[in-house]
Amino acid sequence: MGYTTGRRPWSSDPPTPAGDEARAVRNKIFYFGLLVVVVFGILTLQLARMQLVNGEKYRLRAETNRLRQVPVMPARGLIYDRDGVPLVENRPAFAAAVVAADVPAGQEMDISLALQDLTGRPASEIEAIIRERKASNDPFTPQVIKENLSNEAAFRLREQLASLPGVRVVVKPVRVYNESVLMSHILGFVGPIDAEEYERLKDSGYQYDDRIGKAGVEYTYESLLRGVAGTRAVETDASGRELRVLGETAAVPGMNVVLSIDVDLQRRVEEFLKAGMGKSLNAAAIVMDVHTGQILAMVSLPNYDSNIFSGEVDQAALAKLSQDPAKPMLNHAISEMYPPGSTFKQITGAAALQEGVANAGTMIYSPGYLDVEDEYIPGKFHRFKDWRSDLGTMNFYRGLAMSSDVYFYYLAGGYVKDGRRVFQGLGPSRLADWARRFGLGEATGIDLPGESEGLVPDPEWKERNVGEPWLLGDTYNFGIGQGYVAATPLQMLLVTAAIANGGDLLIPTVVKELRTADGQPLQLKRQTVKRNLNLDPRNLAIMREAMRQAVADGSAFTAQVRNVTVAGKTGTAEFGERRPDGSYKEHGWFTGFAPFNNPEVAVVVFMEQGNGAGTAAPVAAKILDYYFNQLKVAKGNAGP
Amino acid sequence: MISWRDPRPFDFVLLAAAVALTAYGLVLIYSGTLNTSGGALEEVVRGPVGRQAAFALVGIALCLVISRFDYRFLAQGSAGLYIGLIAALLFVLTIGAQEYGSRRWIEIGDTRVQPSEIGKVIVILALAKYLSDNSERVKDLRVFFTSFAIALVPALLVFAEPDLGSASIFILIWLGMVIMAGADMRHVLGTIGMFVAMAPFALIIVVTDYQRERVSVFLDPARDALGTGFNILQAEISVGSGGLWGKGLTNGTQTQLDYLRTQTTDYVFSVLGEELGFVGAMALFALFIILLFRGLRAAAISQDIFGRMLAVGIVIFILFQAFINIGVNIRLFPVTGIPLPFISQGGSSLITVFIAVGLLESVIVRHRQVTL
């Protein structure tokens, strides 16, 4: 017995529905049945639309969900000196990275804070990166937060990965330079890709957090050093874990670059230059093969340390570099133009010979100055001084060897005495024309970034830029490499090389050859000559002989080297504001080649605030002495 | 005494449909948790599948007990149950457990009870009692509004949790039952009209940011593609990519690679859609339609108004829970967090629907009694 049987007084006991009412109830229940059918009908229609009509579209989206293309980064090419000395390595290092898509919404700050503890990077920065990446169209590629983690930090991070969704420890090689200071201006460095570069290069396989060559060879040869990224198709779960590799195209490692630089020579050049530059703010020196244009050494002082850009940039060191008045980041051998001073006489001399303005026997007397009547005020004279007053009467050889300014005033501007033209000079237009033919006023085309073009003035240029007419004095100054003309040390070196090699203006290079990653040399079809200057070989011989005499018993005697005959030209170029005593600050130049009979190498030495014979030429002598009497001997006279 | 061999017309088809739906759910939960359980039998039994199966056994047992029970006895207790429900909902609102931004649970040990689930059955009982007691005066505005208040109070309380889905289920249950009771259709339509007119204001004033965000993300999931919108998009992709036959049980990439979230509760239907396709969904719909028609049959054959009200309320309850849950999965509705009856993982919901089935059986079993 229980409450489940029988009638109970508390049970409601309605009357049996009468006919009408029963029908109304059945009707309503019928409508409820209809409601059930309609509800499931709606669901069925929507399902059919999604699964049957648009099923293919959704299947595709499910596939794109599951499959990810993961880039496989190529190993960056290595760089060697001409004898195979490795100058850079890719050192494996751990980096903390974040896959923004896998960081759960709302946890960005928690994860950023945890990463701050582990990496030291401010959480606000990390959070900003995560949010930015989430909003981007590729939130799946790991974004490096901190490179170059210590092994201990990487280990601690690995242990905590489970509680940090989206965080990864990735192996990211760091570029480490072996001769990071000595070679800084040639090697350059790699740095994080900036927004503009990324926008331009993202279709060429560059990643958001990629590194890219920013200076030097790393910049110029970026596309070859970089290699080609591969891709790996992987199946990933929603938290980005790679479950299965479904296919892979291998990355092609970057090319190796063999520089034309001899690192031993480079080291000695730096050493000599450093010792010789004294209090000069900057100094630069280049040694080049006069036939191939291959640079054997190129030093610009002060230099910097390429390694401060490896991994995390050392901001303090960078700030110090950018505030240094000596501009250590600038390659003064190619990026800064200076008045070339008397080294320009190579161009004035060669032009005068070729244009028939002078020949080897042209005799000119220097009383130590030249007085020129003012072009507007009759009776007023301007005095153009020679650097010495005891030079006397000189032929062409002596004029160049002693670097007589008066001699070259004549060649450049001619001379009018008492209303009578006693000498017909080149004039500014022909001089400017020859300066340009010798490569001044245009980039040399060297495979390093940041070249200065220099400046070749002419009357039109002066009118336009200074707003004054060209005067005879301007021609005189031009002829001795003063006034407006300006050139880089490399440009002056190419002038000397052209005289040495028979008139070819070379295109210089710092690279000897390219090799594939497995060491196969690549045939490089490089244009070594920009143009031939069409100089009469006899005139070139006169130039070379004059330059030999300059070193042998002329103004450049401090460039003499035992066992080797050197030919060259010094320059001491005035610059800046005139001092109260009428003097100027001076740059010191020397440019020359050796051996005289069979030229192999040309060398240029430049010193900001120096003296041609006093400070520049002795450094050149040391360089050439080392090159011919030690390096070449050690290498068994193999030559460059 | 409860006699287990009962000659009276227990509806086996109804129970079979309920058990089949539950089994279907277990299979989907098994697939949905495969990547955490690994598929090992021991892990499966100890994991959500085993837990759900245990809840199912409790539910079936309760169902059988209740079916032996005279539902009219419960009518007497409905007022007490109702007061208890309101107290429980107030309790949840003040100190309930919070998850996904809302308070819906009471924690008892490590078990969470969601009172709004059983609350739906309690409201059905209370409404059935009130409407059957006042069946003569149901066209009176006073009776009409009193019945409305019975549903509205718990609806507002769950709305504040916030649980817009369950709140609308309370209102829909009332609507179905009051229509069944024979209310004046002008009153019904007037109330519906009032709701529609108030909706824009409600969206601005009453609805919380959380709900507004859910609605706006529903309209444009891409605006938060990796947050709230992620689930909506992934569910849509899951269901759509299933096609006619589905990718095969345990072979759904969306489900198995974790793209689908809350894949055993809110989005369990997406697992079905992806892995068993349109055909699998039709099978599910068929089981629901059988179950709901057996429920309507109970209403039809019930010999008293209370039983009829009860049966209709339960049918409305299960129908709209299923409608809203599946509708969320296939982008007909914004996310509401309503479980799919019998299928979704969760004890409160499963036991509640089995109690409901038990009540239907009770109505069916007793329909001839009065004629004895």
Image (cartoon, rainbow, N blue to C red):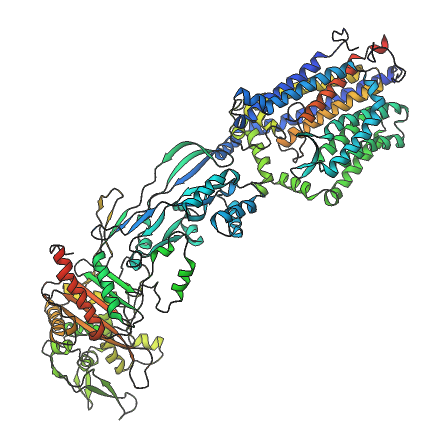
Pick the quarter of the image with the C terminus of chain A. bottom left
Q: Is residue A160 left or right of residue B177?
A: left
Q: Is residue A436 visible?
A: no
Tell me the quarter of the picture where residue A544 sits.
bottom left
**Image spot of residue A390 (x, y percent):** 15, 85
Q: Residue furthest bottom?
A: A379
State the quadrant of the N terminus of chain A.
top right
Q: Nearer the viewer, residue A4 or A526?
A: A4
Residue nearest the viewer, comparing A538 with B335:
B335
Q: Which one is in front, A23 or A447?
A: A447
How many marks do you count on the picture?
0
Q: Residue A441: which quarter of the image?
A: bottom left
Residue drawn 71% across the image and 25% down it:
B319
Residue B212 in percent (x, y) is at 68, 42
Q: Please give the name of the residue rendered at 44% of the width and 42% of the height, measured from the top-left corner.
A: A155
The x and y percentages for residue A169 are: 44, 42
Q: In this rendering, does residue A138 appear at all? A: yes
Residue A544 higher or lower than A89, as above or below: below
Please report the residue visible at 18 percent of the width from the left and 66 percent of the height from the top.
A622
Where residue A265 appears, x then y in whole percent? 20, 59
Tell me which residue sits at (21%, 47%) in the image: A523
